[in-house]
Amino acid sequence: MKKYHYIIIICLLTYLNAQSQSVTNVGTIPKLNIKKKFENLWSVNLEIAPRVELAEGSSLTTLENSTLYTLTDITTVVSRTLGVSNSIGAGYLTRLEKDRSTSHRFIQQYVLIDYKGTHRIAHRFRTDQTFRQGGVPTFRARYRISSDIALRGQTIDPNEFYFKISNEYLGILRDQENDIEIRLTPTLGYNLKNKNKIELGLDYRIDSFINSSPDHRYWIQMGYYFPL
């Protein structure tokens, strides 16, 4: 993964944020991720991720406090390893929203991993379909590239820190209206002795390119990863 790729993206997103008069949100997403691998090459991944909005404004300089529980996502993905570096999977997400309504999302994905010395590069291709009672279905095509980089030595060993960065592009179709979303997430992680991991990062999202001025969302992510 070339570092210049991310430098260009950061500069572009910073420029759009400065020029836009649209909505800017700041919040937090704590995550609990539990993964179980089986000897027959199958695995199950469960993630619970509530979302809380902390501030809102037209830009980062006009934010006002607005602590508000937004939703909770509960995601289950079942994957099958196809070879040394690729897998396919399918999943289901339940979204519990603040108004007590529920959304249902069906997920299909393909993951390809490329190992590059001290780090690995993962490519994830995903499609999903979201349905909500009384609402319009949403269809998305997604591509994410991410990398885990050891900060000491050649591999991410127990009791060591590591750096992870991901960049995702989403094409969105909702009621014949197209949209685009871009996500950039730099993260600092710590690999515990028992193979559990703790991560802290910033998930920056920008969307609504086509129909209006872009919206900006800054989510502080705190994740705990627990393999069974």
Image (spheres, rainbow, N blue to C red):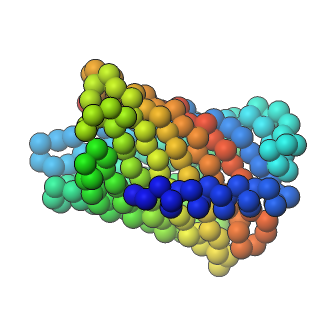
With 134 as the anchor, is 93 left or right in this view?
left
- Residue in the image at 63% along x and 41% along y: 219
- Residue in the image at 85% along x and 58% along y: 21
Looking at the picture, tell me which residue is in the foreground, 135 or 124. 124
Is residue 129 in view from this perspective?
Answer: no
Estimate the x, y position of residue 83 in percent, counting from the top left: 15, 58
With 38 as the anchor, is 121 left or right in this view?
right
Looking at the picture, tell me which residue is in the foreground, 176 or 12. 12
Task: Name the residue furthest bottom.
Answer: 176
Residue 113: name its quadrant: bottom left
- Residue in the image at 67% along x and 44% along y: 218
Task: Name the residue furthest left.
Answer: 39
Estimate the x, y position of residue 184 in percent, counting from the top left: 56, 52
Estimate the x, y position of residue 97 in percent, counting from the top left: 64, 44
Q: Is residue 156 above or below residue 44?
A: above
Estimate the x, y position of residue 225 in percent, counting from the top left: 38, 32
Looking at the picture, tell me which residue is in the foreground, 181 or 45. 181
- Look at the image and tell me in which quarter the C terminus lies: top left
- Look at the image and tell me in which quarter the N terminus lies: bottom left
- Residue in the image at 70% along x and 55% along y: 14
Q: How many marks?
A: 0
Looking at the picture, tell me which residue is in the foreground, 132 or 205. 205
Is residue 20 in view from this perspective?
Answer: yes
